[in-house]
Amino acid sequence: MEVREKIHPSEDSKYIQQHLANERTFLAWIRTILSVVGIGIVATSLHFELNRDLSRPADFLIKIVGFSSLLFGLITLIYSVCSYMVKRKGINDGTFRSVSGYVVLTGVFLAVLLVILCVSFYLTYGLAIR
């Protein structure tokens, strides 16, 4: 007869569902980062590829969009890793608290980014309302 060792559950295994949800949230932040950075790169690339020297203000705004999307992606990456680790510890310790500040900040940033893209589009092409 084979004797099996009794396996003691680790701290992590007590809250498997919560840890899996934390990992899904982390991956959602990564998808958000890729989307924001992708929008910035595509907008910048298309602008300078299709519209060379059309509008200095639009060129400046598009450069802001490209740079700020990269910077925001980097900041969000750092935040998401730190947030994941803090939530992991909070889940294990039973002291988890939900925060929403960065979610609001992300929404505001994306709104500002879209406004800048709209203004640069207007400066480049104007509005042909007839």
Image (tube, rainbow, N blue to C red):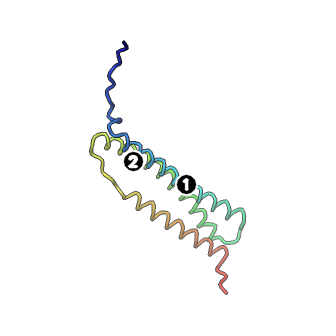
Q: Where does the image place residue 19, in percent across and percent down from the top left?
A: 38, 42
Neighbour tally class for label 1: few under 14, some 14-19, many 20 plus, Cα within 10 Å: many
Neighbour tally class for label 2: few under 14, some 14-19, many 20 plus, Cα within 10 Å: some
Q: Is residue 130 above or below residue 56?
A: below
Q: Is residue 78 above or below residue 116?
A: above
Residue ID for mark 2: 83
Name the residue: 47% across, 63% down.
109
Indicate which disc, 2 or 1, sits on the residue closer to the N terminus. Answer: 1
Residue 70, which numbered label?
A: 1
Name the residue: 48% across, 47% down.
27
Quadrant hosting residue 107: bottom left
Name the residue: 40% across, 45% down.
84
Judge from the rendering whether residue 122 lies leftward or rightward of residue 88; answer left or right. Answer: right
Instruction: Please count the marks in the image.
Output: 2
Judge from the rendering whether residue 94 lies leftward or rightward of residue 108; answer left or right. Answer: left
In what quadrant of the picture does the C terminus appear? bottom right
Residue type (three-letter) at the residue carrying disc 1: Leu
Alpha-carbon span between mark 2 and mark 1: 20 Å
